[in-house]
């Protein structure tokens, strides 16, 4: 990490920790977890923004959501 770091102690289920270590590989568990936390914070901020937009201008109509979802590529 290029930025100053703070050492944390976290707990997680053993299987999750094992999978995270395996996936992190050479980049290291700390970098992997930092990236995962950053992504989750971005997702939560986006959710808050969407809620604010729903409050300000109203929710997207269900029919429009269905139409867009039907056109969105499946993964």
Image (cartoon, rainbow, N blue to C red):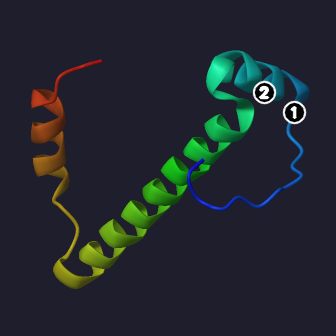
Reply above or below: 2 against 73.
Answer: below
What residue is shown at x 78% (from left), y 27% (from top)? Answer: 16
- In front of the other: 39 or 52: 39
Please tell me the numbered disc located at residue 49. Answer: none
What residue is shown at x 10% (from left), y 39% (from top)? Answer: 67
Reply above or below: 22 against 34.
Answer: above
Q: Position of residue 47 (x, y in %)?
A: 41, 62
Q: How many marks?
A: 2
**Residue at the disc numbered 2:** 16
Q: Residue furthest bottom?
A: 56
Reply above or below: 68 against 15.
Answer: below
What residue is shown at x 18% (from left), y 47% (from top)? Answer: 65
- In front of the other: 54 or 19: 19
Please tell me the numbered disc located at residue 13. Answer: 1
Residue 68 occupies quadrant: top left
Residue 33 occupies quadrant: top right
The local secondary structure at tag 1 comes to loop
* Crowding near the residue tagged with mark 2, few <14, some 14–19, many ≥20 C-alpha atoms within 10 Å: few
Taking the image as shown, residue 30 lies to the left or right of residue 62, namely right
Q: Position of residue 51 (x, y in %)?
A: 36, 71
What residue is shown at x 41% (from left), y 70% (from top)? Answer: 48
The local secondary structure at tag 2 comes to helix
Asked if the residue at tag 2 contacts the one at tag 1, i.e. Cβ–Cβ closer than 8 Å, the answer is yes
What quarter of the picture does the C terminus occupy?
top left
Label 1, label 2: how far apart the Cα atoms are: 5 Å
Q: Position of residue 7 (x, y in %)?
A: 82, 56
- In front of the other: 50 or 70: 50
């Amino acid at each position: 990490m290029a930025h100053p770091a703070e050492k944390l102690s976290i707990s997680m289920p053993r299987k999750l920790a094992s999978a995270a270590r395996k996936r992190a590989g050479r980049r290291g568990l700390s970098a992997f977890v930092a990236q995962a936390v950053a992504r989750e914070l971005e997702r939560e901020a986006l959710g808050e923004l969407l809620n604010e937009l729903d409050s300000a201008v109203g929710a997207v109509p269900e029919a429009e959501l269905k139409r867009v979802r039907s056109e969105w590529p499946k993964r």
